[in-house]
Amino acid sequence: MLPKTIEWKENKVIILDQRRLPEEEVYLECKDVYAVAEAIKTLAIRGAPAIGIAAAMGTALGALGIEKRDFTSFYRELLSICHTLEQTRPTAINLHWALQRMKVICETNKEANVEALKELLVTEALAMLEEDIEINKRIGEAGKDLIRDGDTILTHCNAGALATGGYGTALGVIRRAWEQGKGIKVVATETRPLLQGARLTAWELKREGIPVTLITDHMAGYLMKRGEINLIIVGADRIACNGDVANKIGTYTLAVLAKENDIPFYVAAPLSTFDQSINRGEEIPIEERGEEEVIAPWGKRIAPMGIGVRNPAFDITPHRYVTAIVTERGVIRAPFKETLKRMWAEGNGK
Ligand code: MRU
């Protein structure tokens, strides 16, 4: 059974605390928007689509607590709630996309009374969760033929059920190929510094019986060179109009190595991950996290005090390294800019 990443229950947001995996399956009960914001910030819930859903549910939760009776004052408080959520993590565009959807619900229902508006906001957040699972299944379907029987697939970080409403994007494609009966194997990179590959991807795949082998990040090139990897598939936090991809730190290194070794490099992402306002990867804001994640992971100091530390959480993979992007509308290949422009023009973007 797939893990339940996030749920709405009796006007609370229930979040599987991913910081505690794989040791413990503990659920956080978020009773207000601040608890949801904290859960996003501290990576109790993470992964671009899951962050979007959490932000939408956090907004709905915050809305339920607003006491103002007139639209203008209600909406002013709602915008402040959205602002709190917007500050949590800067790179995943799904967060902004989801909050925008919640704002549109208010703006298009100005005539509704505040109680009805609150209900509409809850309904919209729940719809986002359901839609996301459906979208991931469509991504899986669209991408399944990229994987052949017997393939060994390398994936980085966690772009699975845990990173989404359910099923996953990159792991959704792998899952679908597995459901088809293909004899596949997955190599998961541990994904320093927060070990999403080791703790989450390995946990998720093992639960389902999909064969998974764990490697530390810098072992990937060795395996590629030896011909032990047939393809790479990862998720994305934001994709620019030219196809440049922001994803977990280390993705760029893998993509360059894939090209060097003639290995296809695929990205799986919903259309909500594309940022139509950004032309190139360099414009995507990259989150820099605290030094303790690098210098003292899980409270254990592994380097001397008084040194410099960098901790960018994401990097940009230029589109020239991306073989194709798998979306719920099908597989997009280079030239991405032209294909995406055509897609938006045809109104297929959302
Ligand atoms: O810092 P994280 O764990 O939120 O980073 C997650 C990733 O980089 C994922 O690959 C990305 O969000 C896609 S999830 C379907």
Image: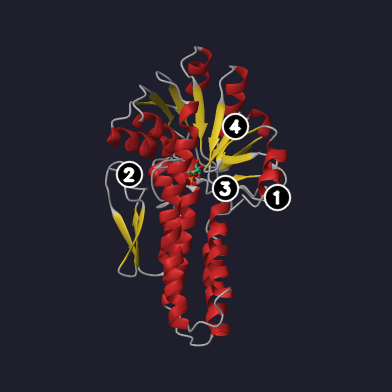
Q: CA distance from mark 2 to mark 1?
A: 43 Å
Please give left or right for residue 189 compared with residue 82 in the image: left
In this picture, is 286 found above or below 64?
A: above
Please indicate, yes or no, whether residue 259 appears anywhere in the rendered image.
yes
User: Which comes sooner in the sequence, label 2 or label 1?
Assistant: 2
Mark 4 or 2, which is nearer the eye?
Answer: 4
**Which residue was labeled with disc 1?**
345
In this picture, is 85 found above or below 131?
A: below
Q: CA distance from mark 4 to mark 1?
A: 20 Å
Q: CA distance from mark 2 to mark 3?
A: 29 Å
Q: Residues within 10 Å of mark 4 (few under 14, many from 20)?
A: many
Residue 54 picture location, percent across and down: 44, 59
**CB contact under 8 Å: marks 3 and 1:** no
Q: Which mark is residue 21?
A: 2
Q: Look at the numbered disc 2 and give the secondary structure of its residue.
A: loop
User: Which comes sooner in the sequence, label 4 or label 1?
Assistant: 4
Write the residue at 43% across / 81% down: 115
Quarter of the picture containing the N terminus is top left
Residue 129 picture location, percent across and down: 42, 56
Please give left or right for residue 261 compared with residue 159 in the image: right
**Which residue was labeled with disc 3?**
271
Quadrant in the picture for residue 297: top left
Q: Type of residue at label 1? A: Ala
Q: Residues within 10 Å of mark 2 (few under 14, many from 20)?
A: some
**Which residue was labeled with disc 4?**
324
**CB contact under 8 Å: marks 4 and 1:** no
Queried on whether the Cβ of the residue with tag 3 lies below 8 angstroms from ligand 1, the answer reads no
Q: Type of residue at label 2? A: Leu
